[in-house]
Image: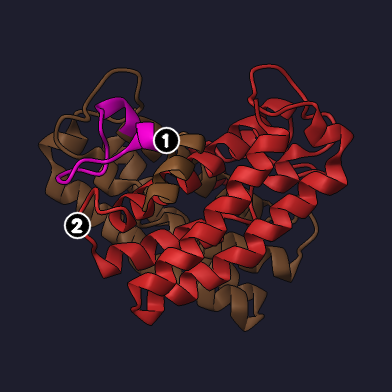
Chain colours: A red, B brown
Amino acid sequence: MRSFRRLAIALGLATAAVSAHASFRRPADAVHYRRAALLVMAHHTADLGAMLRGVRPFDAARARLDARVIETMSSLPWPAFGPGTDVAHTEARRSVWTEHARFLQDARRLQEATPRLVAAAQGGSIDQLRAAFGQTVHTCKACHDSFRH
Amino acid sequence: MRSFRRLAIALGLATAAVSAHASFRRPADAVHYRRAALLVMAHHTADLGAMLRGVRPFDAARARLDARVIETMSSLPWPAFGPGTDVAHTEARRSVWTEHARFLQDARRLQEATPRLVAAAQGGSIDQLRAAFGQTVHTCKACHDSFRH
């Protein structure tokens, strides 16, 4: 226990400590977290898309990694859009908070698409992967159209 | 193909396009990406640590998610510390580039620890999870001591 606490302080984790009721101590922490998770997801989406469009050579192992990262990321950003996190310097529209149920429904559509993306990346058929990727990015775009500036 | 390109432009992914030789178009893109991946990893490490230290109630499903995210993140940041990415406004020390083999060895130690963390989170024994978490964060700290300001 004590050694954990020392390690946590050494790693700078203690200052990022979470309360019993929320994952983020300050609204700014939620903003940084959700932006980071979305950036990682966007990077791997762009990477996979570039391979599927022929902009870079297709690499099956890399496609599997991209799909796995996208799937892992797809559940992370949404709890960081909680009450009180509608703060300045974000690309999120007010509608994220005023139409939160619809926002979460859009997020769920992405989360339903990404396991199929992982399965397609493991399956080995580029056509299936291209179809699953198309379905995934359509859910991204639908949500951005409603909820992002 | 054409519809992908339209979607990619709509999603802002086209501007993040990657070259055939590197994952990042500009050094700043690599910096943003590695910082984002490390921030997500740090958040879930802090969250899991807080549960294991008793700062917040232990939640087994949440611990499994934290472990899975940490494991996924543990392979991502390192390729973004490539040649030419030793640019301003980062916490990385010069040693990342001047002692790159040792840096990658430290990264590998983390990547060896995180599958055990996932297994322990799924196993259900808090003592085993605590031990696996301790081993994981020791690899974080060892690398930070050598390579982070």
Q: Position of residue A79 (x, y in %)?
A: 74, 47
Q: Position of residue B107 (x, y in %)?
A: 29, 54
Which residue occupies the foreground of this view, B4 or A63? B4
**Label 2: chain letter:** A
Quadrant of the frame with the N terminus of chain A: bottom right
The residue that disc 1 covers is B35
| Left or right: residue A146 compared with residue A137 | right
What label does residue B90 carry, if any?
none
| Left or right: residue A9 compared with residue B86 | right
> Is residue A20 visible in this depiction of the protein?
no
Q: Which residue lies at the image location 77% right of the left edge and 29% below the top edge?
A: A85
Which residue occupies the foreground of this view, B116 or B69? B69
| Left or right: residue A54 compared with residue B45 | left
Q: Amino acid at mark 1?
A: Arg
Answer above or below: position of A85 versus B78: above
Which residue occupies the foreground of this view, B53 or B26? B26
Q: Which residue lies at the image location 51% right of the left edge and 36% below the top edge?
A: B10
- Check disc 2 and report its element: helix, strand or loop: loop
Q: Position of residue A143 (x, y in %)?
A: 68, 43
The residue that disc 2 covers is A57
Q: Which residue lies at the image location 72% right of the left edge and 70% below the top edge?
A: B60
Secondary structure character of the magenta stretch overall? loop
> Is residue A97 visible in this depiction of the protein?
yes
Bin the neighbour count of mark 2 within 10 Å (Cα to Cα): few under 14, some 14-19, many 20 and up: few
Q: Amino acid at mark 2?
A: Pro
**Label 1: chain letter:** B
Say which of marks 2 and 1 sits in front: 2
- Check disc 1 and report its element: helix, strand or loop: helix
Q: Which residue lies at the image location 31% right of the left edge and 38% below the top edge?
A: B17
| Picture quadrant of residue A108 | bottom right
Confirm whether the magenta stretch covers residue B3. Answer: no
**Which segment did they paint magenta?**
B13-29
